[in-house]
């Protein structure tokens, strides 16, 4: 079992190295934009409604759960700070990554897994075409670049959802709501969420493509690969969120601590 796990990790790291090599050399070349453009459309445009709806309801749920507690201590005007800070720093990037892992990750695994089962990947190799350059690098690159963009949309709709519940439904004054939001949410908070989403996008793209690229034969193998890709992406996103939150928190503390000494 341990040996099998080490073998899989080794294959994955080799796969990752080859993918990043072609991401920086092959796909970014002008003549290869035709490989990247369809993936940008699939990952970005087609995922936008799901991401925006998810972000809106996340903001609304946070506001619904928090408003009575804030009102009980007479601080309901500070609702904007907790809702928007939670969305921008944590929930926006994480939920955007998880939704993409479910929608795009499953599609990537199924697509590449079907090509693997029907020997289309072997056919590319026989024609002298590197399948990682042709199939994997454009998909991972699209996930890497568009996950932060989709995270921004999730942040925006999450903020609007929290505003709708707090101001429109609960009658909180809009002026203090946004004033406290401005005080609580800093530029660093926004950047930290975007930085996380780059890692989430790369992780879900690599895991999904690897699972499809090396899935077992048959329809059952493709189905198992899709399930494994989503579960693994979900766990890795949460683990990355924890580690990056620790690192970014230390950077913020060191940076603002240094500023306070000046």
Image (tube, grey):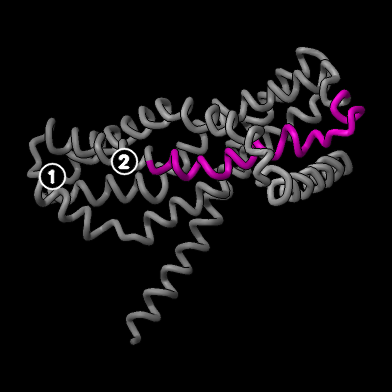
166 sits to left or right of 6: left
Q: Nearer the viewer, residue 135 or 58?
A: 135
Residue at the right extreme of this rendering:
126
Identify the residue at horizontal 63%, vertical 38% (top origin): 33
- Against 129, is 111 above or below? above
Asked whether 4 falls inside the magenta stretch, the response is no
Identify the residue at horizontal 73%, vertical 32% (top origin): 135
Residue at the spot of label 2: 156
Q: Position of residue 238 (x, y in %)?
A: 54, 44
Spatial CA distance of label 1 from label 2 is 28 Å
113 sits to left or right of 70: right
Q: Position of residue 73 (x, y in %)?
A: 13, 49
Quarter of the image for residue 180 reads bottom left
Residue at the front extreme of this rendering:
31
Q: In which quadrant is the N terminus drawn?
A: top right
Label 2 packing within 10 angstroms: few (<14), some (14-19), many (20+): some
Answer yes or no: do the residues labelled 1 and 2 have beta carbons within 8 Å?
A: no
What residue range appears in magenta?
Answer: 123-152
Identify the residue at horizontal 22%, vertical 60% (top origin): 183
30 sits to left or right of 259: right
Q: Nearer the viewer, residue 157 or 254?
A: 157
Identify the residue at horizontal 74%, vertical 27% (top origin): 212
Q: In which quadrant is the C terminus drawn?
A: bottom left
**Dot 2: what SS?**
helix
Residue at the top extreme of this rendering:
219
- Against 203, is 183 above or below? below
**Dot 1: what SS?**
helix
Residue at the spot of label 1: 72
For the image, the number of numbered tags is 2
Asked whether 135 falls inside the magenta stretch, the response is yes
């Amino acid at each position: 079992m341990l040996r099998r796990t080490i073998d899989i990790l080794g294959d994955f790291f080799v796969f990752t190295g080859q993918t990043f090599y072609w991401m920086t050399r092959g796909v970014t070349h002008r003549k290869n934009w035709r490989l990247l453009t369809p993936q940008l459309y699939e990952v970005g445009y087609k995922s936008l409604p799901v991401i925006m709806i998810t972000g809106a309801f996340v903001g609304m749920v946070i506001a619904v759960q928090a408003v009575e507690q804030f009102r009980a201590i007479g601080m309901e005007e500070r609702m904007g700070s907790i809702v928007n800070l939670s969305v921008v720093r944590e929930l926006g990037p994480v939920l955007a990554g998880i939704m993409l892992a479910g929608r795009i990750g499953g599609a990537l695994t199924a697509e590449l897994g079907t090509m693997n089962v029907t020997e289309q990947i072997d056919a590319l190799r026989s024609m002298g075409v590197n399948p990682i350059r042709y199939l994997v690098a454009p998909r991972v690159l699209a996930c890497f670049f568009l996950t932060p963009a989709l995270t921004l949309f999730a942040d925006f709709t999450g903020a609007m959802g929290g505003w709708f519940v707090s101001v429109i439904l609960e009658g909180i004054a809009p002026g203090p709501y946004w004033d406290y939001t401005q005080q609580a949410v800093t530029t660093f908070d926004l950047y930290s969420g975007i930085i996380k989403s780059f890692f989430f996008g790369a992780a879900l793209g690599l895991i999904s493509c690897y699972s499809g690229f090396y899935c077992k034969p048959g329809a059952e193998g493709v189905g198992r690969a899709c399930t494994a890709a989503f579960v693994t992406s979900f766990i890795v996103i949460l683990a990355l969120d924890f580690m990056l939150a620790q690192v970014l928190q230390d950077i913020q503390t060191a940076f603002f601590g240094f500023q306070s000494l000046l």
